[in-house]
Amino acid sequence: MIKLIPDTPDGMLEFKVTGKVTDADYETVLTPEIERALETHDRIRVLVQFGPGFEGYTFSAAWDDTKLGLRHWSGFERCAVVSDVDWVKMVVKGVSFAMPCPIRCFDLDAHDDARRWLFESLGTIHVDDEGDGVVHVKLIGKLEPGAYDNATGDLDALIAKYGHIRLLLDLREFDGWQGLGALTSHLSLVREHRRAPTRVAIVGDEAWMDLARRVFSVFTDAETRFFAGDGFDDPEAWVRA
């Protein structure tokens, strides 16, 4: 059976799974609760505890699980799985790379750690108006889809203000994307604003140069130049020239 744990923070759902899971558990508990939460939140964070006493899924329940995940593919911001069942942990680790959101497995005695992980911030995007149409965008840490929500609004406001912008893209503290959903959000942001920049200075280490070059060559006609190292004076001077 699947039981909803009450009194969780806003934007988070927690479920406890015991015994044999059937399609009725999805129809009466899991699916309606997730769809209800997504009516008021673009993305939700979910914790699922398996056991003790978890006995597996019926075939129809496994199919319901697949359909639920596909139907709300982009609706999950982060998922934590708490279990001491070896095959559950193996499945989570095996599919985590292909999931659109970060997913992580915790042992049963680390339940509190799983809750804390659901709400910690992995990364952020800072968008700053430097004046005269110059916009500084700094990517920090390992980004997940939610990090792009505010950044999109900030960029829209600056583009409305200036019409066209000159972009300083700072990748010096960028550690990549947390899941396919974050990468998709990044590419969507670039594509939607591809005509706004007239000049783009990208600052980072050599590891990101080729990726940045490919992204911008596909999505923008802006004049682009790459700067390696810690200094920011040269790229700022170039983008303002």
Image (spheres, rainbow, N blue to C red):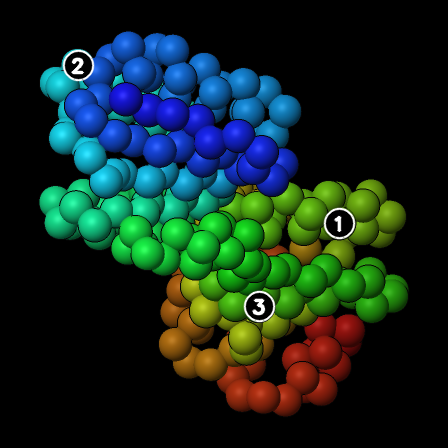
> Where the C terminus falls, by quadrant?
bottom right
Considering the numbered disc 2 on the image, is that residue within a helix, a strand or a loop?
A: helix
Answer left or right for 236 relative to 120: right
Question: From the viewer's perspective, is the residue at label 3 or at label 2 nearer?
Answer: 2
Q: Secondary structure under badge 3?
A: strand
Q: Residues within 10 Å of mark 1 (few under 14, many from 20)?
A: some
Q: Nearer the viewer, residue 161 or 47?
A: 47
Q: Earlier in the sequence, mark 1 or mark 2?
A: 2
- Tell me the CA gap for discs 3 and 1: 16 Å
What residue did someone put label 1 on?
154
| Residue type of the residue flagged with mark 2 | Ser
The image shows residue 3, relative to residue 88, as above or below, that is above
Q: Is residue 71 left or right of residue 232?
A: left
Q: Residues within 10 Å of mark 3 (few under 14, many from 20)?
A: some
Pointers 1 and 2 in contact (CB under 8 A)?
Answer: no
Residue at horizontal 25 percent and vertical 38 percent from the top: 51
Residue 224 visible, this orientation: no
Quadrant in which the N terminus appears: top left
In this figure, which residue is indicated by the disc labeled 3? 140
Of badges 1 and 2, nearer the viewer stands: 2
Quick check: 62 above or below 142? above
Q: Which mark is drawn over residue 189?
A: none
Image location of residue 125, percent across then percent down: 63, 60
- Name the mark on residue 60: 2
Specify the amino acid type for callout 3. Ile
Residue 100, by quadrant, is top left
Compared with 207, 200 (above or below) is above
For residue 26, above or below residue 145: above
Q: Is residue 195 left or right of residue 227?
A: right
